[in-house]
Image (cartoon, rainbow, N blue to C red):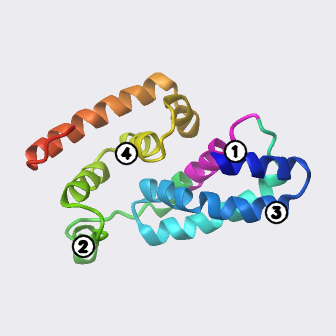
Amino acid sequence: MPAEATIIPLIQAGRTQEAFEQLVPAYRRRVVGLAFSVLRDRAAAEDLAQEVFVKLWQALPQYDGRARLSTWIYAITRNAAISALRSRRTAVSMSDPAVFDEVEGREVAPEESRDDALLWRAVDALPDKQRQATVLYYQDERSVEEVAEMMGLPANTVKTHLHRARAALAAALGQSGLEAT
């Protein structure tokens, strides 16, 4: 990622304020996206992203470069999202009218086709780890090794999640009349 090439030297030079000012716009969308893939709630993902950036601001001087900057950021995001999910512990029922309306009322962006909407609904329906691996691998274009590091799983486990996700998506999209390509 090009942002890493400018941010890491700033961190190493002790210029964390400048590094942070570049880090937020470079990673905001992906931090929110990853948080959303775990929490499945846009408002909660936005709130969590703010908390993650506070944690990043505090931890930035300790970044040691052992992992890629993006991997480090995503690991912090994923851990925070999982912690937030565990702390919620409230059962959400599809019979609750507000929940049903929110799930069924997903707005499709004008440029998003019917096929894209079907695909993302199918991705949203995947089990958590399959959904997270799919988003990181296909949407964020991460390698299997990077996804494994971000998710804290062995690479072969990530491959298994991706294989199962592809099979589930092919089945779901085949049933909806959209052929998987």
Residue placed at 62% from the left, 68% from the top? 50
Label 1 to label 4: alpha-carbon separation: 23 Å
> Which quadrant: the C terminus?
top left
Q: Is residue 29 left or right of residue 4?
A: left
Q: Is residue 158 left or right of residue 94?
A: right
Please give the label number shown on residue 69: 1
- For mark 3, does the 10 Å Cα neighbourhood hold few (<14), some (14 to 19), or many (20 or more) residues? few
Q: Is residue 48 visible?
A: yes
Specify which label sits upstream in the sequence, 1 or 3: 3
Magenta-colored span:
66-80
Tell me if residue 12 comes above or below residue 17 in the rendering.
above
Q: CA distance from mark 2 to mark 1?
A: 36 Å
* Rendered location of residue 178, percent (x, y): 13, 47
Identified by mark 2, the residue type is Gly
- Residue 110 is situated, as x and y percent measured from the top left of the image, at 29, 71
Who comes first in sequence, dot 1 or dot 4? 1
Q: Amino acid at mark 4?
A: Arg
- Residue at the far top in the pictured view: 156
Give whichever of 138, 96 is nearer the camera: 138
Callout 2: helix, strand or loop?
Answer: loop
Residue that badge 3 annotates? 18
Residue 131's label in the rendered image is: 4
Q: Give residue 57's quadrant in the image.
A: bottom right
User: Which residue in the rendered view is the most extreme toward the right?
Assistant: 13
Q: Amino acid at mark 1?
A: Leu
Badge 1 vs badge 4, beta-carbon distance below 8 Å: no
Tell me which label, 3 or 2, sits earlier in the chain: 3
Question: Which residue extends farthest bottom?
Answer: 98
Quarter holding residue 180: top left
